[in-house]
């Protein structure tokens, strides 16, 4: 099982890296596209929340966001209430990349469900749910 999970994990990462590279014409890394994804999906897209979601330091997140700003995928605007905070927003280019990345995820799920009827295997769904819960609570 460990061998299968590792192989699956690294294969998904490799395909995702290639997909991101092609979709963004080598302008974004996998980490950068996930930063874009977090910014777009966040209810409160500020640097602290991005860092927390990525499980990285605020300083590291700041470098990643600044890189995305320079590349033209993200813009920052001051919070109207707390001027110390910057609200992160995707540019049109950032939104296009976000949408393309979302399509990749949809294709991956569609490929899994194409011939596989997950509701016929409730134990697999329970197992995946348990794995997800473990990963949510895992601490080093």
Image (spheres, helix red, strand yellow):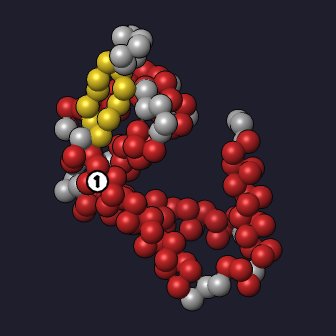
Residue positioned 55% across, 78% down in the render? 112
Left or right relative to 21: residue 61: right
Residue 86 shown left or right of residue 53 in the figure: left
How packed is label 1: few (under 14 Cα within 10 Å), some, or many (20 or more)? Answer: many
Residue at image position (74%, 73%) is: 124
Split into 4 quadrants, where in the image is the N terminus? bottom right
Place of residue 45 in the rendered image (x, y in percent of width and height, measured from the top left): 43, 32
| Residue of label 1 | 97
| 26, above or below 125, in the image | above
Q: Is residue 80 left or right of residue 91?
A: right
Residue at the outermost front position: 81
114 or 28: which is nearer to us?
114
Question: Can you see residue 81?
Answer: yes
- Residue drawn at (36%, 48%), measured in percent from left and top? 33
The residue located at (70%, 35%) in the rendering is 140
Say if 95 sits above or below 47 in the image: below
């Amino acid at each position: 099982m460990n061998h299968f999970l590792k192989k699956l994990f690294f294969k998904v990462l490799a395909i995702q890296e290639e997909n991101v590279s092609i979709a963004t014409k080598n302008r974004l890394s996998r980490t950068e596209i996930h930063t874009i994804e977090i910014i777009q999906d966040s209810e409160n897209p500020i640097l602290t929340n991005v860092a927390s979601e990525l499980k990285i330091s605020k300083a590291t997140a700041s470098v990643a966001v600044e890189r995305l700003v320079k590349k033209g995928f993200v813009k920052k605007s001051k919070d109207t209430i707390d001027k110390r905070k910057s609200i992160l927003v995707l540019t049109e280019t950032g939104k296009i990349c976000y949408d393309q990345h979302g399509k990749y995820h949809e294709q991956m799920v569609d490929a899994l469900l194409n011939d596989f009827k997950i509701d016929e295997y409730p134990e697999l769904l329970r197992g995946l749910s348990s794995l997800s819960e473990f990963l949510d609570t895992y601490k080093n």
